[in-house]
Amino acid sequence: MTAAPAPLDPILLWWLLIGAVVLVLPMALSLLMSTRRRRATQALVRMQRLAPAPTAKAAAVPLQMPRKVATPRRLPFVGDPDALCARAGVQMSGNAFLVLCAVATIGLGGIASLAFGPLFGVALGPGLGLLAPVAVLRARHARRVATFAQQLPDALDLMMRGLRVGHPISATISNVGRTMADPIGAEFRTMATQISHGDYLADAFQDLAQRMQQEDMDYLAVSISIQHGTGGNLADMLSTLSRVIRQRIMLRRRVKALSSEGRISAMLLSSLPVIIYGATSILAPDYYGAVQDHPMFMPIGFVIVGLVLANFLVLRHLVNFQV
C-alpha cells in the first residue's frame, strides 16, 4: 500500500504567505506608481512638443534639443522587462510582468516544496515562475520578428505607391496600419499615433527598429533617418529597399533549404543518446540500476551529459547560418 501524504505544515504555509506579501506588495505599489508616472510623462512630452517655435531673439539656443532616451533596466536572466514585453507584443508593463513572475514563483515553489520537498521547491519555483515566462516571451518575439520580416516588403510597396500618388508619409503609414495584418499593422498603427502626437518621423522609425530588433528594419530606420536629413525621392528609396529585402528573404530560404540535411542530422545525433538512455531504462532497468550505487556512476554521468550538451552546441553552431 502506498503511504499517505504528509500533512501540510502550518508554519511553512505561514512563512510562504509572509514571503508572498513581502515580495508582491512593494512590486504592486511600484506598478501603480509607475503607471501614473508614465501617463504624466507622456502628457508632459506631448505638451512640450506643441510649444511655439523659438523667436529670433533666441537664435543662440539650439533649435532641437537632443532626444532623451530612458536608461533600460537590466535584470539577471530577464534583461529589460519593459522591452521584453513590448517586443513580444504583450500589453503589459515590465513591473506587472515581474509581479506575475513573483507570484508564480512563490506559488509554484510552495506547491513543489509541500509535494516533493524544499529542494525541489527552490529549483522548480524560479524555473517555472520566472525562466519559463521569459522563454515564452522571447519565443513569441522571435515568431513576431519572423512574421514582421515577411510582411515588411509588402508594407514598403504600399507606402511607395501612396507616396507616388501624392499622399503624405504620415497617411501612408496610417494606411499600412489599417490594411495590413498584425504584427506589422499593430506596429505601424503605434508609429502613426506616435507621429500624430508630435514625434519626429526618424525617431518613430528608430523606436520601431528597437522594438523589433530585426536587421531589415534597422536598414529601413537608417534609410529614413538619412532621407529625412538630406532629402531625396523617398518613394524610390522605399522601392529599392523593398527589392533588397525580398532578395535577402529568398537567400535565407535558399540557405535554409541547402542546410536542411545538416540540421536534421544534428537533431538526430543530439537526441540519439537521450533516446537510447530512455529505451534502455524502460526495456532493461537493471542495465543502469545495477551500477547506480558505484561511486564513479555520478561523475561519469555528469561527464557524459556535458559531452552530449557540447555536441549539441557545436552541431547547432555548424548548421546555423546568419544571412
Image: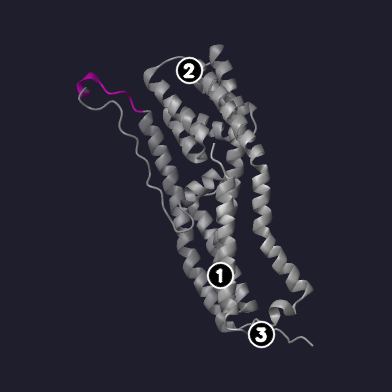
Circle number at residue 169: none
Q: Please tell me whether mark 1 or mark 2 is closer to you in this view.
A: 1
Q: CA distance from mark 3 to mark 2?
A: 72 Å
Side of 279 where 110 appears, left or right: left
Q: CA distance from mark 1 to mark 2?
A: 59 Å
For mark 1, give the secondary structure: helix
The answer to whether residue 228 of the structure is visible from this angle is: yes
Q: Between residues 38 and 171, which one lies in front from this camera angle?
A: 171
Query: What residue does disc 1 label?
Result: 303
Side of 122 where 72 appears, left or right: left
Q: Which of pointers 1 and 2 lies earlier in the amino acid sequence?
A: 2
At x 61% / y 84%, what residue is drawn? 294
Q: Please tell me whether mark 1 or mark 3 is closer to you in this view.
A: 1
Query: What residue does disc 3 label?
Result: 7
How far across and down, in percent of the image, does residue 106 sit? 55, 69
Q: Which of pointers 3 and 2 lies earlier in the amino acid sequence?
A: 3
At x 46% / y 30%, what residue is drawn? 221
How far across and down, in percent of the image, does residue 8 sit? 64, 82
Query: What residue does disc 2 label?
Result: 234
